[in-house]
Amino acid sequence: MQSSAPSDPQPSSSALEAGTSKKRKSSEEQSDSAVAPKAPKIHPFFSKRTEKKPEGSFQWLKPLGPTGSCLHGINLHPTASAKVAALDLDGTVIKSEFATKSAAAGKPPSWSWWRSIVPDKLKELYESGFAIVFISNQALKPVALNTWKEKIPLIGQALSDIPFRILAASQKDQYRKPMPGMWREIERIFKEEGVEIDKSASFFVGDAAGRQYVKAKGDFSSTDRKWAENIELPFFTPEEYFLKLPPHDNYTMPGFRASSLPNLPLVTPTSSPIIPTPRQQEAVLFVGYPCLGKSTFYRRYFQPEGYVHINQDTLKTSQKCAKVLQEAIKEGKSCVIDNTNRNSPTRKTYLDICKANNIKARCFYFTGSIELAWHNNLYRAFNMPPSAAAKEPERALLPYIAFSGFRDNLEEPTLAEGFSEIKKVNWVFEGTEEEKKHWLMWLQIDGK
C-alpha cells in the first residue's frame, strides 16, 4: 500500500550531541613525619573495579509469545494511541551495523542515526500524538543478539524525552516479518489500554522494500513492504518519509503469492463421482505433500461413508498401516490410506494387498506445489484467525525437510501401478472471509 507521507512540522535545527565526561583528578598528601601503614598485597584480579552501568530510561520487559521469542522493551512510559508510527530499526532509524571489534572488547556497541534528522522527526511524531513503535527482525546467534540488545538502551538514552516501544523477532516464527505476529501483539497491548488503532491514521517505515536499481544494488529483501501490506498499513521507505523523496516504483516482491493460484475445479476428472455408485468395497490412496488438505478431504467425503482412516502419523509405521488395511478388508470395509505415499514402492505395499484380496484401488493425487504446501504449513501453525484456530487441534510447524524430502522422491502415480482410476485434487481454499484474508497474506519466515 503506497501513500503520501504524513505532513510534519519543520524539524528542529538542534542536533543531537553526545556528552563528554570529565576525568576526575585525585591527589594524596602524606605528612613527612607520618609513616603510612603498609597495605596488604591484593592480586590484580580482585582489585579490578566493576563499573556499574548507568540506569537509563529504557528497560527490557518479559518477552512475548509462547516461547518468549518476541523481545519487548519500552523507553520511558509509552502510552497507547490510535495513531501508530511503526518503524523498522536497522537501516531505517539507525544505520545497519553488526557487532564490531569495540563491542567484542567489552566496550558499548557502536551505532549512529540513519540520518541526523531522525531524532527530530521522532520527537515531532511524539508531540503530534503518535505512539512510536520499533519493529525489528533479529534472528541472530546468542552473542550477536546480546550485543544488539545492549544497543537499544543507548538509543533510549539518546531519545531521553521520547517514549517508544520496541518489538523484535528473535526466531523464525510467527513474529518474524512479514508474518503479522508483532503487529497483533501491539493491537493486543493497546486494546488492553482501551485503545483501538486507526490504521488509516497510522503508517510503517522500512528499508526492506524490494527496490531495484539499474546501476546499483537493490534492497536485500521486501519483507517490510510485505509486512505493511499484510497488516494494511500505509508504507514508506526511509527516503520517502524522512527525506521526502518521491516513491521508488521499481520494486519486486518475490515469493509465493496465494492469490496467484488459478481457479480450478476441486476434483478432476468430473465425469465420475468421488464416491462410486453403486457402492463397492475399495481402497483409496492419497498422494501429495503434507498440508494440502488430505485429511480434511477424507473427513468431508469419505468419513461420512464409513471408510476406515489409515494414517501413519497416528499409527507411526507403514507396517501398522498395512496391517490395518488387511484387517479392514477382511471385515468388508473400504479404506483411505491418508499418507503422502510419495513413490511407487511405497504404494506397491498397499496395492499388493488390494490385488491379493481382489478389491479395486483408486488414487487421489493432490497436485499442489511445494510452495503452496509450505504456505499452508505456515498458515496452520502461525496465522489462522483465533476463531478458526479454536476449532482445530493445535498444529506445530512441520520442518521444511518434510516437504523437500517428498519433492525429491516424488513419483507421480500411474494406472500401470494397478489403480483402477486416478483423480487429481486441486487446491481450493474453503473457509470464511476472515480465514481467507489470513490465508492470502504473505507468509514466510525466511527468504526475500
Image: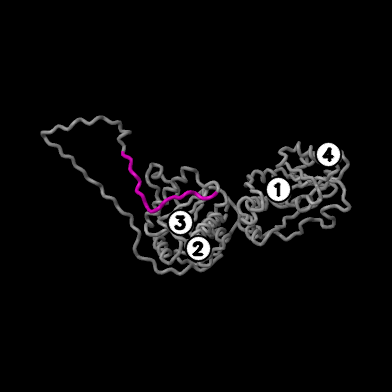
- Where is mark 2, residue-wise? 195
- Where is mark 4, residue-wise? 353
Q: Earlier in the sequence, mark 3 or mark 4?
A: 3
The answer to whether residue 38 is above or below residue 243 is above
* Quadrant of the snapshot with the N terminus: bottom right
- Amino acid residing under circle 2: Val
Q: Earlier in the sequence, mark 1 or mark 4?
A: 1
Q: Earlier in the sequence, mark 4 or mark 2?
A: 2
- Where is mark 1, residue-wise? 289
* Main secondary structure type of the part rendered in magenta: loop
Q: Mark 3, mark 1: which one is toward the viewer?
A: 3
Q: Are marks 3 and 4 in contact (CB under 8 Å)?
A: no
Q: Position of residue 117 (x, y in %)?
A: 40, 62
Q: Earlier in the sequence, mark 1 or mark 2?
A: 2
Residue 141: say if magenta.
no
Q: Position of residue 347 (x, y in %)?
A: 78, 42
Write the residue at 84% across / 49% down. 421
Q: Mark 4, mark 2: which one is toward the viewer?
A: 2
Q: CA distance from mark 1 to mark 4?
A: 24 Å
Residue 102 placement, left or right of 399: left
Q: CA distance from mark 2 to mark 3?
A: 15 Å
- Amino acid residing under circle 3: Arg
Q: Nearer the viewer, residue 158 or 212?
A: 158
Q: CA distance from mark 3 to mark 1?
A: 41 Å
Residue reaching furthest to the left? 33
